[in-house]
């Protein structure tokens, strides 16, 4: 069997794309789930312990959704843009909801 150089190069590109999606789903999914957990813990109208528990349970569904989203989109840059946009929006929302003391070590 002979393999042409084009098919070997295509296989390498496909593998790199899958690897990029795995890294993006893992790192980006964790970041989105962590920020969503923090934001929901601060903003849910429940007692603190119930809000944290509810937000933590929801974070598993959020992480699974991010993984599905990353692999469902046609391009890795589009998936990265959506995730980074979500991270920025949730980070800003958390900063507004909890106050800047959350990020500089002060008490909220």
Image (cartoon, grey):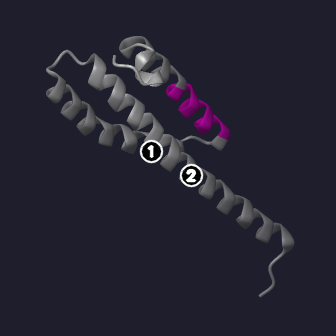
Q: Residues within 10 Å of mark 1 (few under 14, many from 20)?
A: few
Q: Which residue is depicted at the point 43% across and 11% down?
A: 96
Q: Which residue is depicted at the point 64% across and 43% down?
A: 76
Q: Is residue 87 above or below residue 4?
A: above
The picture places residue 62, in percent across and down from the top left corner, at 36, 37
Q: Of 108 and 14, which appears nearest the observer?
A: 108
Q: Which residue is depicted at the point 45% across and 46% down?
A: 67
Q: Return the disc, 1 or 2, that comes first in the chain's sequence.
A: 2
Q: Is residue 55 above or below residue 102?
A: below
Separation of residues labelled 1 and 2 (CA atoms): 13 Å
Instruction: Label 1, secondary structure: give it.
Output: helix
Q: Is residue 86 within the magenta segment?
A: yes
Q: Is residue 49 left or right of residue 79?
A: left
Please identify the dominant SS of the magenta region.
helix
Q: Of 44 and 18, which appears nearest the observer?
A: 44
The reply to whether residue 57 is visible in this rendering is yes
Name of the residue lying farthest toward the front? 106
Quadrant of the rendered image containing residue 16: bottom right
Task: Read off the magenta span.
Answer: 77-87
- Residue ID for mark 1: 68
Quadrant of the rendered image containing residue 53: top left
- Residue ID for mark 2: 23
Q: Of 30 and 48, which appears nearest the observer?
A: 48
The picture places residue 28, in percent across and down from the top left corner, at 51, 41
Q: Is residue 89 left or right of residue 2?
A: left
């Amino acid at each position: 069997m002979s393999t042409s150089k084009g098919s070997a190069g295509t296989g390498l590109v496909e593998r790199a794309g899958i690897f990029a999606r795995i890294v993006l789903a893992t790192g980006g999914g964790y970041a989105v789930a962590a920020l969503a957990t923090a934001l929901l813990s601060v903003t849910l109208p429940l007692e603190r312990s119930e809000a944290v528990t509810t937000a933590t349970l929801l974070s598993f569904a959020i992480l699974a959704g991010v993984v599905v989203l990353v692999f469902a989109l046609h391009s890795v840059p589009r998936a990265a843009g959506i995730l980074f946009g979500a991270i920025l929006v949730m980070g800003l929302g958390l900063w507004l909801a909890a106050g800047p003391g959350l990020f500089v070590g002060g008490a909220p």
